[in-house]
Image (cartoon, rainbow, N blue to C red):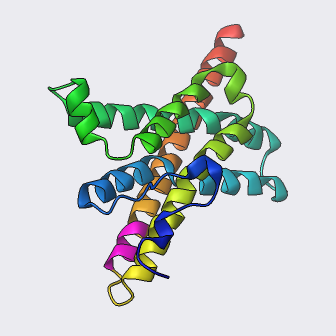
Amino acid sequence: MKNGELNKISTPLMQLNFMDNSFFAYLQQLELLVFFSGYPFLYLLIGSLKSIKFVNPEFRKDINQLLPYTYAFAGVIFIGFELKNLYPDFSFNNISQRIQEPFWYVWGILSLLFWIPRINKIPTLSFLHSLFFLYLFVRIFKKFTSEMNTDHSFQANNMRVYTISLLLYLTILFVFYFLSFLVKRFLEKRSH
């Protein structure tokens, strides 16, 4: 495979070259991966709880309902991180120079839509939305695997980034579950 062939996508939706060869574009892609790439695995992991019989059905239901909020909260953290990086110059010129991958940034910001109750009632939508970031992860991983056969540091770094993303989602989900548990207990005690 020639250098650059991997950059061209044949589907009409993505006829753009998303993989800029600059180091800054790579760093921004890693930022996106940290905030969004671990969600599909978490979603599938939680979905696999259905096949485990000793897991409480109420626990499964609660966790499944929290998944879109978990994804949306990662989007909030992403926006906060980007605003911190842009500070103190929030001008359009600075934003356009700083953001190398506008499609992926906009797609990441769209994760905030999962705060909307009507949208977050369908957890599968958050999974489908996050698959674009899994695609980005696989694409970057494949690119560096094909271009740098001798140096595995990029592959190891990408796997570290994916692991951090997964840990981020597990932490957010645990905190949300714990908070929802406390709120339920408080409301139960108050009603008695």
Image vertical order of residue 81 relative to residue 9, above or below = above
| Residue shown at 18% from the left, 29% from the top | 87
Residue toward you, 7 or 125: 7
Task: Please give left or right for residue 14 compared with residue 4 in the image.
Answer: right
Q: Which quarter of the figure has residue 83?
A: top left
Examine the structure image and report whether residue 63 is included in the region drawn in magenta: no
Residue toward you, 169 or 19: 19
Image vertical order of residue 164 relative to residue 140, above or below = above
| Residue shown at 31% from the left, 41% from the top | 99
* Main secondary structure along the magenta-highlighted residues: helix
Q: Residue furthest bottom?
A: 150
Q: How many marks?
A: 0
Q: Which quarter of the figure has residue 120?
A: top right
Q: Which quarter of the figure has residue 140?
A: bottom left
Task: Please give left or right for residue 132 compared with residue 119 in the image.
Answer: left
- Locate the C terminus and report the quarter of the image it occupies: top right
Image vertical order of residue 62 relative to residue 90, above or below = below
Question: Magenta region: which residues?
Answer: 153-158
Residue 129: % across, % down = 62, 42
Residue 153: % across, % down = 32, 78
Instruction: Tell me, yes or no, if residue 92 can be seen here.
Output: yes
Residue 189: % across, % down = 65, 15
Residue 43: % across, % down = 66, 50
| Residue shown at 65% from the left, 15% from the top | 187
Residue toward you, 163 or 87: 87
Task: Please give left or right for residue 125 compared with residue 13 in the image.
Answer: right
Instruction: Tell me, yes or no, if residue 38 can be seen here.
Output: no
| Residue shown at 62% from the left, 53% from the top | 40
Q: Residue furthest left?
A: 88
